[in-house]
Amino acid sequence: MRCWPLALLLALLTSPALADEACPPGNLLAGRAPSKALKVTNAKRITDGVAPEDGDDWRTNLTAVLTGRTASATWDLGREVTVNSLLVQGDNNDTYQVEGSVDGLTFQPIWRVPAHPNPGMRIRLQQGLNATVRYLRVGDAQGDNAYSLGEVQAFCQHPATWPPPMERKTGTLPKTETSRKVRMSQGKMVLGILGGLAFLGLFLARRREDAMLDLIAPAAGAGSLLYAGWMVVQEANRRSSASDAFVWEKRGLVIAGVIAGAVGLLIVKRWLGKKPVARVAERGALSMLILAGAVTWVNFGTFHGSRVVHYWDSFHYYMGSKYFKETRYTGLYHCSAIGELDDGRRDEFKDRQLRDLRDNRLGPALPQLERQEECRQAFSPERWAAFREDLRLFRHHMGKSWWAKMFMDHGYNATPVWNMVGQYLANQDWRAHIPPEGKTTAPVDLAKLSPVERAAVNRDFREARIPAFEQRMYKLVLLDFLLYAGIFALLGWAFGLRTAALAMVVWGSGYPWAYFWTGGSFGRVPWFFMAVAGMCFMARGYKALGGAGITWAMLLRVFPGALIAGVSVKIAYNLVRHRVVSAGHRRLILGCTAALVALVGASLPAVGGFDAYSEFLGNSFKHKRTPLTNHMGLPTLLSWHPKRVARHTKDSKLDDPFAVWKQERQRTLKERRLLHAGLLVLFLGLLAYAGRRLNDWEVTSLSVLFMIGIFELTCYYYSFVVLLAPFVLRRWHYVAVYIAMPIVTQYLQHEIGWYDEQYTAETVAVLVPVLYFLGHAAWERFKGIERAPDALEPPTVEGAAPA
């Protein structure tokens, strides 16, 4: 009995150890290799403590791939323990079963890991499980048969920070997958070739009567559609099992075959009915080219690989317009950094670079966090809460790695007229999306909550706020898709199906204006739509609307104003030579003036008066002084020097590795400014000479040369080459050169590695064809050559309906 105090003391001393054995701290799976892995490749990656970034591809050097539903990985924890919390990172659109067992033979379900609404690798969390296990198994995957796991963690003691901190990396794709860019490029080149064959067939059929020649265009059109359908199937197969792939292949080929077959039956019906079969065949071919081109432009249905929306680009135009009154043109990145600071993410800024939008200088982010008052004073508490929540939503969709890189971009650059509409759309019902105070997913707020409260907040964010945000973004992105459709509808209305099909082939097969850059974004198309509308209205005889369209495009993006160069030269010539301005030109001037006054006047209340225009001009000049590696244009071409390219001047030791490259590029362009001016005068002279016998819409089409010659634009604005489509149908060799242009741009983009060199070459690939069209038109005027008898161009008489 005298020993009982000693026994009590020993019990008190050992009870914490026993408790720890029953419920040890930390990740129970840390560093443990699976005791059994069935149909799982690289299973050790699941518990190596390194997780892919959110949104990463499902099959990288950081993931373990599960082959089919029967695949599973099992871990032996060494003894019975209680599992209360689980973290599972897997492919987003699949579910996974987590099971536990005490004997390794009989397993009981613990948690069915749900699918995640966002694409790529995504983390799912669960707590309050209270499951006693020795063996833990993950498997029974269900979804799209593209199953993978990036990280699995199990806890008895719930971590103080949830989800727990872990090492995150951006995965690299296996060699078989790094070729997606090449696959897209090659597929688009095939579209260009088939489109070229179709138009070659149309020209040949006009030169001689031969039933076989009439079949070239329909065959090429059907081939383009079948090929596009086959590419869609192949890309779908990459994320499907073999059996599902066969089903997809059958569906895709059936759909494409039905469309091609329907056109064929229509041709036969017309043939038997003694109708003009050639005309029907041509329309069928052109319709199939339009459909194939549209499918090709969206990367054969893969869009951005795993999503439709371009969140990086949308961030700038959504946030920039929604909070324009607070951030203007210089505060978007700075205020975003302050918002993240308030969320408790200061540690992330230790190694982050951030561009100061006041002068476009790139440097360490931390010093900018010290300058806070400007942002805080600009926002009301309510607007600041809305701003921070929007930051969390964009960050969630982009992943930590891309989110950090985005702040090295160049900010919000829309015009006040664009902002007038963008601000209205982005601010719809904005108060409804503000979370309750203290109930956000900000780390600083989550740390104050109990585990149950944290789980509720995370669930609300995942199940309510994210879907609502995605719906808002999809609606805004849909506007751009509708405008794209409107562009080709306008071309068909003004010039006919041939022009619409030719424009679609070039648009769908080129690289500088590919979906990769701004597809799936918000408000990137209005300037393009209005520029095309202006030319189309001119062609149909609506000169006032044509002038208004071009002016509206200019007020949305500035550089489309160069499209008026050709008509301006014609007006000036008639005024000097004949002292008269035609009635059509008077209507055009009236349309330009009315649009300018109306749109600028309407924008003033929305943007806070004329100060916004002054700020916009300052912002534009700042960007003009900031060369970019994906710039294109005559200034880009003239600033090229073989010893001053990025491969020789990039210095990774500097805050801005391209600082020296930018200085050298500006210096080279300055040295050649007289050459630049001389070339512009030459271009204007050629246009004036050739344009004297051309219609207003034709000189407007050729005026794309001045968008290339005057401005240094980022590559994606070169979608304006679509404006050339109606003009090039004058000659078969114009069409050949025009279709060769996008094929060459695709070849260049995967043959040249450095962006600055690539886009200099891309400039040549676009500029040379445009100069050829203008130069040949001037030569024809000099020789007095009239239109070729086999031309496919629209009527030259403005105001007439297309053939």
Image (cartoon, helix red, strand yellow):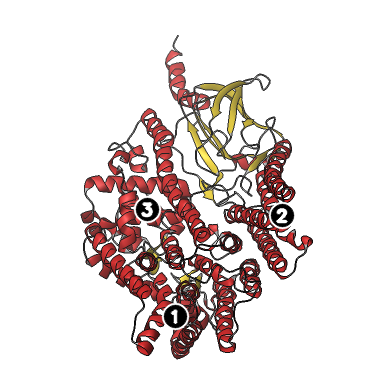
Q: Which of pointers 2 and 1 indicates the residue nearer the eye?
A: 2
Decide if residue 159 is on the left or right side of residue 140.
Answer: left
**Within-10-Å neighbours for mark 2: few <14, some 14–19, many 20+:** many
Residue 324 image-quadrant placement: bottom left
Q: Is residue 566 visible?
A: yes
Residue hosting label 2: 223
Q: Which of pointers 1 and 3 indicates the residue nearer the eye?
A: 3
Residue under the point 22% across and 60% down: 608
Which residue type carries mark 2?
Gly
Decide if residue 380 is on the left or right side of residue 323.
Answer: left
Can you give x and y, in whole percent of width and height, for residue 323 in the image? 30, 54
Which residue type carries mark 1?
Gln
Image quarter where the C terminus lies is bottom right
Which label was assigned to residue 715? none
Which element is circle 3 on? helix
**Within-10-Å neighbours for mark 1: few <14, some 14–19, many 20+:** some
Can you give x and y, in whole percent of width and height, for residue 204 in the image? 72, 68
Q: Is residue 642 visible?
A: no
First in sequence: mark 3 or mark 2? 2
User: Real-space Cα distance between discs 1 and 3?
Assistant: 32 Å
Residue under the point 50% across and 81% down: 693
First in sequence: mark 2 or mark 1? 2
Which element is circle 1 on? helix
Which residue type carries mark 3?
Tyr
Image quarter where the N terminus lies is top left
Residue lying farthest to the front in this orientation: 274
Q: Is residue 110 above or below residue 403?
A: above
First in sequence: mark 1 or mark 3? 3
Which label was assigned to residue 663? 1
Residue hosting label 3: 318
